[in-house]
Image (cartoon, helix red, strand yellow):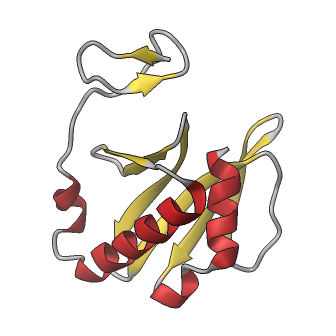
Amino acid sequence: MWKCPKCRREFAKRGQGHSCTVYPLANHFKNKEHAKTLYDELLGKLSKKAGKIKVESLPCCIHLVSSYTFGCVYALRSGIRIHFSLQRKMESPRVREYAKVASKRFMHSVDVKGKKEIDAELLGWLKEASG
């Protein structure tokens, strides 16, 4: 692992390009209390299912990190949007969109509007993504 000397974030590749901008986590949730509630629920359940998850708050989104960044969370007024990467294209009506990002890697996007949607299926996908 390589640690950026400026922002102290860790990366698998030495000198990996990134933004060193630190962004307060609370800023993502200004006027988005429902999103904060869902995010807290997600993080609590995901930590139990997948082990220690590191959070990196960036201006664009909130990164979810195991030994690498495996997903991110966006705070919306109506809930949260979660992006995560798998080595397969997943077919599910819950997936709002996906994109092939490498020859064997697909980014998936799922919207969560209520606590009931943070279920075993979603947590299983995120655990798979976390490695």
| Rendered residue at 42%/68% (across/down) | 44
- Image spot of residue 11 (x, y percent): 48, 23
As drawn, is 51 to the left or to the right of 37?
A: right
Residue at the location (52% across, 41% down)?
Answer: 66
Judge by depth and name the residue closer to the eye, 113 or 96. Answer: 113
Nearer to us in this view, 95 or 12: 12
Q: Is residue 28 left or right of residue 104?
A: left
User: Residue 78 falls in which quadrant of the image?
Assistant: bottom left
Q: Note whether 90 is above or below 119 in the view shown.
A: above
The answer to whether residue 107 is seen in the rendering is no
Please identify the quadrant where the C terminus is shown.
Answer: top right
From the viewer's side, name the closer residue of 21 and 100. 21
In this rendering, is residue 83 above or below 63? below
Residue located at (79% from left, 45% from top): 87
Q: On screen, 4 above or below 60?
A: above
**Image x and y of residue 43, in percent:** 42, 64
Pick whichever, 40 or 18, lies toward us: 40
How many numbered marks, from 0 up?
0
The residue depicted at 41 percent of the width and 25 percent of the height is 10
User: Relative to 53, does residue 44 appear above or below in the rendering?
Assistant: below
Picture quarter containing residue 110?
bottom right
**Residue 16 in sight here:** yes
Q: In the rendering, at what x and y percent does residue 36 appear?
A: 29, 73
Residue 104 percent location from the top left of the image: 82, 38
